[in-house]
Amino acid sequence: SPDTIDAYMESSLIYDLEDLQDTPALAIQSTEDNIVDPVQAALLDRVAQKEDAPVTYKTIEGAPHILQKRSHLDRLCNMTADFLSVSGVCDKR
């Protein structure tokens, strides 16, 4: 329905990248995600590159949507810490 499409477009980062021009963002996708299609995250990455938006795209290989294995959680923490140190997000407080 048109309402559903409008709601999706309002909540999808793909359609709102102009708001990210001054704000670094980290997108992390699990490769075995059965809720969010990995293709959607890859599309976000391609659109962000095209728009020159400061979006960093990473994947967690073999992980489902909800991370429960310690190895997946460790990878998530390391990706986030690396992003925060490199992007300077924490320095802008």
Image (cartoon, rainbow, N blue to C red):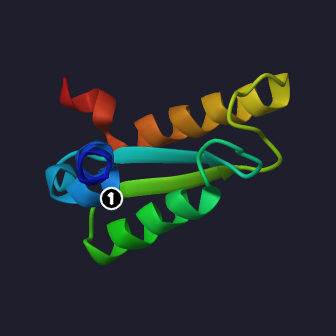
Instruction: Left or right? Give the position of 28 relative to 50.
Output: right
Task: Identify the residue shown where x is 56% and y is 45%.
Answer: 28
- Residue type of the residue flagged with mark 1: Ile
Instruction: Left or right? Give the position of 21 relative to 53.
Output: left
**Residue 56, above or below 84:** below
Quadrant where the C terminus is found in the figure: top left
**In-front residue for pair 67/74:** 67
Name the element at disc 1. helix
**In-front residue for pair 89/40:** 40
**Residue 91, above or below 62:** above
**Residue 82, above or below 56:** above
Circle count:
1
Instruction: Left or right? Give the position of 1 relative to 65.
Output: left
Residue 22 is situated, as x and y percent measured from the top left of the image, at 16, 50
* Quarter residue 50 falls in: bottom left
Task: Identify the residue shown where x is 83% and y is 47%.
Answer: 62
Residue 40 is situated, as x and y percent measured from the top left of the image, at 52, 60
Number of other residues with Cα within 10 Å of mark 1, as a class: few under 14, some 14 to 19, many 20 or more: some
Residue receiving disc 1: 14
In the rendered image, the residue lying farthest to the front is: 1
Residue 11 is situated, as x and y percent measured from the top left of the image, at 29, 42
**In-front residue for pair 72/47:** 47
Residue 56 is situated, as x and y percent measured from the top left of the image, at 45, 54
